[in-house]
Amino acid sequence: MIAPGRGTAILEAAGITAAAPGVVTSDTAGKSFTDRLAAAVGLHRAWDRAPAVMASAVPPVLTS
């Protein structure tokens, strides 16, 4: 998830902390932010988040 600027307020309202796996936040879109974002995107998944997703009461939507 990307939360530039005040986007962290939206994440927190959804119960997602800025320190959660796969979340990249910054007040500005400077080099540090883009470096961290590129590293996170390069992983393709935030595997540390898998247990929380798998334990969700909401089943995934399956399409045919």
Image (tube, helix red, strand yellow):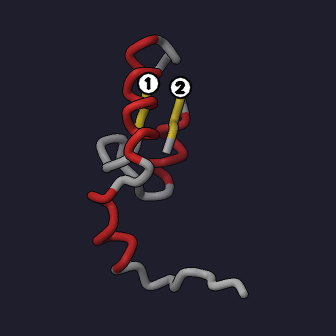
Q: Position of residue 24 (x, y in %)?
A: 41, 35
Looking at the picture, tell me which residue is in the foreground, 59 or 12. Answer: 59
In x, y percent, where is residue 18?
36, 41
Cβ–Cβ under 8 Å for marks 2 and 1: yes
Instruction: Tell me where residue 55 appears, x and y as whole percent.
Output: 34, 80
Q: Which mark is residue 26?
A: 1
Name the image quarter holding the C terminus.
bottom right
Identify the mark nearer the N-term, 2 or 1.
Answer: 2
Left or right side of 19 for 9 = right
- Identify the secondary structure beneath mark 2: loop
Residue at the outermost right position? 64
Q: Residue at x 44, y 49 (%)?
A: 44
Taking 13 as reference, is 48 left or right? left
Residue at left 40%, top 21%?
A: 35
Residue type for callout 1: Ser
50 vs 8, left or right, is left
Seen at 70% across and 84% down, the residue is: 63
Residue under label 2: 5
**Few, some or many C-alpha atoms within 10 Å of disc 1 (few <14, some 14-19, many ≥20)?**
some
SS of the residue under disc 1? strand
Instruction: Say few, some or many: other residues with alpha carbon within 10 Å of mark 2 (under 14 / 14 to 19 / 20 or more).
Output: few
Give above or below for 57 relative to 20. Answer: below
Residue type at the position of mark 2: Gly
Residue visible at 51% across and 36% down?
Answer: 3
Disc 2 to disc 1, how far (Cα)?
Answer: 6 Å
Q: Is residue 9 left or right of residue 54?
A: right
Residue 7 x %, y % = 54, 36
Judge whether 48 appears above or below 63 on screen: above
Q: How many marks?
A: 2
Task: Name above or below for residue 46 compared with residue 29.
Answer: below
Question: Which numbered circle lies on residue 43?
Answer: none
